[in-house]
Each structure stands twice: as structure tokens, then as C-alpha cells.
Amino acid sequence: MGNASVRISQILVGVVLAFMAAILYRTSTDAIAVRTANDARSLGGRVAQREAVRIDQTLGSILALKNDFETGGFAQGPFAQAARSMMQSNPMIDIVDYFDENDQHVAHVEAGGREAFGVPPRAGANKIPGAVISAVDLVLSESTVTRTTTSSHALRVRDPSTPPGGQGRLFVYVAQPLVRHLDVTGTIVARIDVQRLLADDLAAVLPVPYVLDDGSGRLQTGSPGGIAGTVSGSAPYVQTFSIPFADRAWSLTIAPPPADQPAKPWIFVLLWLVAWLAVSVPIEVVGQINRRVRVLNEGLEARVAARTRQLQASVAESQTLAAVVESVHEGVMLVDADGVVRYANDALCRELGCTIDDLMDKLVYEYPPLAISKVQLAELSDTVVTRGFAYLETERTRVDGTKYWAGITVTHHGEEGMRDKMIAVSRDVSDRRRLVDELVLAKEEAERQMRVSTDFVGTASHELRTPATTLRTLSALLGRKVLPRYPLSDDDAKLLGMLDFETRRLANLVDDLLEVAKVDASETPLAETDADLRALVSAEVDATFALDARGPAVEVRLPSVPAYVRADENALRRIIVNLVGNARKFTPADGRVTVAVERLGDRVRLVVADTGIGIPEVDLPHVFERFYRVERPGTEIRGTGLGLAIVARLVERMRGAISISSEVGRGTTVSVEMPGASGTSAADTTAAASA
Amino acid sequence: MARVLLVDDEPMLRSALRQYLEFAGHDVDEAPDGDDALVLARRQRPDIVVSDVLMPGRDGMSLCRELRADPEFADVPFLFITARSTQSDLFDEIERIGAGCVTKPFEPDHLLAAIDDAVKKD
């Protein structure tokens, strides 16, 4: 918008200046015209007057000659002398002729000296043959220069187009009657060389182009070269003057000198342009400045508005935050670098049972209910500066004397890394502490009882070992030594078989119980060594077969190189024996048990798979629990319910992982993954994989 | 067949094992503790000693050391029968001494096999 107004101003200025330039142009042209016209008029007037005077003088000379004749008696000799004298004094007249009253030629005198008497001149064309020159009325008047002859024949004019100086010279013949005693006794005819009188004179006198015209169209002369064009054209300021002479009105036309030509329009266009620029540029500059100032103003206003909004928002936010801080249940306190309380909320006052005035602007370590010493404050400040926050629990005594535990979180507020303001948020954690104390006590009690329980199981099973061995031995003795001596019925033999089976089971149960107790007693550390799982599997499977070759075949798949794991070797043996034993126990004799050792990057996996009776899906999540036994109606196979539990605990304690999958009637697969020994390398893994 | 010195403070187990070993064809002398066993060993010259570890008086470990120290008995195989399977340091010690071990509860046939192995090796 500002831009447009500047443009409009510039255009307006341009239009005004254009008008001014036009007016100036017109005025200037007019002034030149006036001046030129004046000059020309003055010049022309002077020239016309001068020529009139000269013609007048010439006529005067002729008149004087006539007077001399009239008084001198018309003798030829004196005539010639007088005529020659007259022509000498007046070069305008070059020939004088004398005719008597009968129009007979009497004398002829030329300026050049030739004289003739009684013979009409032949040379030249002074007289048109056959023409009669009658008497000329001569009006004598001082006031009028014009002398008109009564006969138009008096005037002889050559072709005006004839070049000057040649035969085309312009002559005017003036006839002057001679009067004697009131009788006309003859005529004097004088030839006036108008060429010299006017044209040459004008050419010498007038500094400007001119044209002389006799008004009849027969004579026209002017300054040499280009004059006719200048004059005959429509050039302005041309002045025409009338010179009456020899019975006609001569007209003199002069053109103003070139220097006085009208001003050139392009000069005014240029002037206009310069003036427009001179005015327009400042307008543009001022416009630009205005625009910038306006833009700045607008920006400033926008910023002021934005800042105002920010401030309002900030104030509102502060109020909101203050309301939030006041609304929380935690006690909030702002402490400055010197330890002076600068802010405390209602909750803190309620917590301490004091008033806000008790806290504000007080040193924290001088107000006992806050329960913090100067040293503690300094330590807190250090911790907060280095760690960004601190947490402490301290027992405080309220103003009314009651005690409570305060959990205080202290954070840093202010410049980073400097001791500055701190914000302390505190709450009553008495309940939580009590609860924690109770939990700790309960846990300790539970652990104690657990230990007692484990010890009991250990002790009890230990005590059971010897009787279990005795029973087994006795049962074996009974079967081998005693019974063969007696004939037994099938039922009796079956009874004794049951006895033998149960004593065997009792022994196994005692063994497993002791193992569980051993595993659960976590104070017994497991030795961490690099054990070769490949070798262990190989040895234990062989040993199992050595003890009992009955049952399903066992297929062993081992890597080509040792598979070291970080574990307790005895525990590993136990794991292998239990898993393989379980698999064989629950797999028919025509089934198959597969034991495989695989290396997986930095871990080693032991997989024991069987084609046995499988475990129902509902039981799978519980198979690692102690004394959990899968109910298998219709089978005689019974375990202690401890084998898998022992394996799972051992694997867990050695940071391994165990998983089981099973399908009833198809078999069970147990997979144990153990961390590999530190020396297990990728190269070994590759070798194992390719083997 | 071998002469076996059986040492255990539990008379029922001792008796049952003695009968079982005898039924298997071995000659068995039995002692209730280490001290008696030491006397009996010097008199009966057993081919193998089978002893409990924990006993009143001289215990099994002490008995074993005593016999190992005696040049006459240094080469007699020694087999522990123990309920202490939780103590790995005990096994370390047994291995160091060069004795065998069968943990309770065991199948009597396993003990027989272990005795046969030890005597044969000797």
C-alpha cells in the first residue's frame, strides 16, 4: 500500500513536471518567436527604409539632372557632362538617354564613358523596340518615395531567372519629361541598375537569408544558397516587408537566423526526465524508509504482543504451578545456597505441625523439626551437585512432640554444577518403613524356617539312609538266600516281589530327598569349572547301561570336538543321569532314547529325547516342581517326583536354561542349555556343525 | 573269594551285609568301630576293608589312615560306605587316600561288584 502511494506520487510528479516542461517549451518557443519576429521586423524595417532612401536619392539625382537641363539649354555637350557627373555621384544610374519633343533620340551617355548622339543605342535592350516612352508624371513629394511614371512602359524588366551579372541584370528605366516654359521639350530616360540598388545591397547588408520579390512574379532574388527553401517553407517567424518602388510593391522576406530557431522539444523531455528523477528518487527513498519503518513497527508490535502473551502465559503457568505445588500431599521446600528456606508449601507445614512463618526465611539447620544438621546439609548439597539428586530418610519430631519418618528427595535447582538452590520434597514414610521392617522380619523368619526345613529334610534323609540300605540288603538276602529254601505259591512270591520293589523305591526316594536338600541348601556353592559335556555324556550313558542293560536303546549324538561348558561337573553328571534315567524309565524296550550334545555359538545344548509315553499337556508346567508326579493310570512305572526338580534347580543354579516338550504317546524332549566355557570359539562351533 | 573286614556302628546293617557277603561266598569279620577294626585287621589279615565313615571312637577315615601308614596293610584295598554324599571335600579326601566309595543307600549287589573290582585290581 505504501509502495503504491509512492508510485502514485512519482507519477503525479511526472505529470506535473511534464506540464511544466510543456509550458516552458511553449513559453520558450513563443519568446524566441517574439524576439525573432522583433529582430526581423526591426532589421527588415531598417533595410526597407534604407533602400527607400537610396531610391529616393537616385530619383533625386535624376530630378537634379532634369533641372540642370531645363536651366542649361539642352545642349548636347553640357548634357553629357552633367549626366556623367550625375552618374559618377550616383552609381545606381548607369545610362541616361535624351529624347527630344518628337521622341527623337538626341544623346546617349553611359557610366563607362561611351557617348552617342542622335543614334538610338543598339547595344543592350535599353528600349524595347517599338515602345513609346511617353511623358512621365513626376509627383514631387518629399514624403513619398514612390515615383510613379505615367506609363507602365517606363519599366523594363529582364527575366528574373537570369543569373546576376549577366544579361539578366535587372534594370528600371525612369523617364523624366523636360519642361521649358510649360512646354514639354523632351524626355530624359535614366536606367537604374536595380540589381545593384537592391539585390546586391541587400545581400551585403542583410545578415540573414532573404527573398526579394517584385510582386509580379517576374523578379525574384535572394541570398545565395538554401534561402528559397528556408523562406518558401512553412518556417515560422518569417517577416515580409513592402518596399514601394517604381510603381509596384516590392516585398522583402527575411528568415530569422538559425540560432533563433525554436527550442528543441527533446531538450525539454530530457529536462523533464532529469527533474522527474531528481524529485522521484527522493520520493522513492522516503517511501522506502517509510515502508521499512512501518515494517519495523509492525514487527515490533507483533513482538510486543507475543511477549505480552508469553508473559501472561508465564504468569498463568506460575500460578498453575504454584497451585499444583500447594495441592500435593508431599511437603515441598525451596532452600537457597545459604540454607535459608525460601519457600514451603502447606503440606510441609501440616507434616511438621508448624506454621509457614516458623519456616520462611529460617536456616534449615536451626529449625529442629526439620532434623538436619549443618554438616548434613553440606553433604546433601555436595551429593545433589554431583549426582543431581539425593534421597534420605530421617526421623523427625513434630512441633507437638510426635515422631515420624520422613523420606526426602532433594533435587538441584539453579546453575548446573554449582551449589545453588535445592528443592526438598518430603513425605511421611513411617507406614512404609514399618511395613518394610515387618517384611524384612517376615522374610528372615521364612528363610530361617526354610533352612530348618531343609536341614530337617537333609538330616532326616541322612538318618534314613542307613536303615534304607539295611532294608535293601535284607530284602536281597530274603530273595536270594532264604526264599529259595521254601516252596512258595505265586501269590507269596508276588508279595515278596512287592516288598523288594518298595524297599528299592524307598532307597531311591531317600537318595533323591538328600539331593534336593543339597541343591536347596544354597550355601553349598557349586564348583565352576570348564567341563566337557561330550565326555560326561559319553561316560554317564555307558555307566547307566553297565548298571542296567534292560530297556530301550540309547543313541548318542556327540560333536566331533569337546563341548566345554562352565559348570559343576558333579551337577552335570547328576543332570545327565536323571534325564537319561527318566527317559529310559518311561520308554518301552522297543522304543528309543536319543541323547545329543550340540554347540550353539557360545552355548552348549544337551537334548534328551525319547519315544516314550509322553506327558499330558496339563502336567507339563508342573514337571519341574518337587514331588509333582504325573498320574499315569494303568502303568506300574513310578518315580519319586524329584528327578526333574533336581535337574531344574541345578540348571538354574548354573545359569543354564531348561525346557520340555512332550506329546502323549509320542515321547518327551528335554533340552538343557548351558553357558559355554570361555574358550569356546566360533571355529569350534563351525567344526562341530560340519561334523 | 576274599576275606572282608566290615566296619560299621550300625549292628543291623552290619549283620545284614555280613550275611549277604557270606552268601556271596566271602569270609567276613565285623567290627563296630575303628579301634576294634584295627585289632581285628592285625589278627585276621583281611583282603579288603569295607568301612563306614562316621562312627563313635575311631572313625573310618582315621582307620584308613592308620592302616595305610602300616606297611603290612598299605596295599589292602579300602572301601568306604557312607551316607555323606553332600560333602565333596570328603570325596576329595577319599580319592586322595586312594580308597573306594559306595554311598548309602546302595544295592547290595553294587557293593559286591565294588568289592570284586577292588580285590581283583589288587
Image (cartoon, coloured by chain):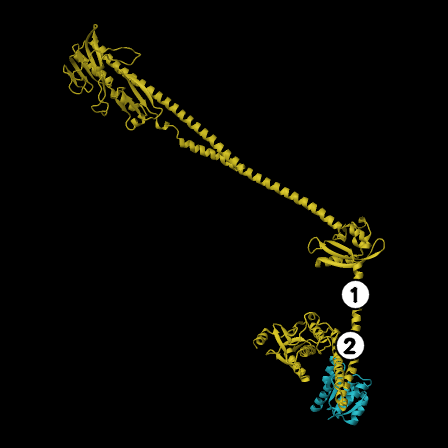
Chain colours: A yellow, B cyan
Q: Can you tell which mark lies on residue A458?
A: 2
Q: Are marks 2 and 1 on the same chain?
A: yes
Q: Amino acid at mark 1?
A: Val
| Image quadrant assignment for residue B95 | bottom right
Quarter the N terminus of chain A occupies? top right
Q: Earlier in the sequence, mark 2 or mark 1?
A: 1
Number of residues whose C-alpha sits closer than 10 Å to that of mark 1, classed few (under 14), some (14–19) or many (20 or more): few
**Image position of A621 (left or right of A150):** right
x and y, in percent, of residue A18 in the image: 45, 31
- Label 2: chain? A
- Disc 1, SS: helix
| Image quadrant assignment for residue B61 | bottom right
Whether B12 is drawn above or below A663: the answer is below
**Image position of A298 (left or right of A108):** right
x and y, in percent, of residue A310 in the image: 66, 45
- Determine the residue located farthest toward the top in the rendered image: A181
Seen at 74% across and 50% down, the residue is: A325
Q: Can you tell which mark lies on residue A617?
A: none
- Taking the image as drawn, is residue A382 in sight? no
Foreground mark, 2 or 1, reads 2
| Image quadrant assignment for residue A647 | bottom right
Quarter the C terminus of chain A occupies? bottom right
x and y, in percent, of residue A540 in the image: 67, 81
Between the residue at mark 2 and the residue at mark 1, the CA separation in whole angstroms equals: 26 Å
Q: Which residue is label 1 attached to?
A: A440
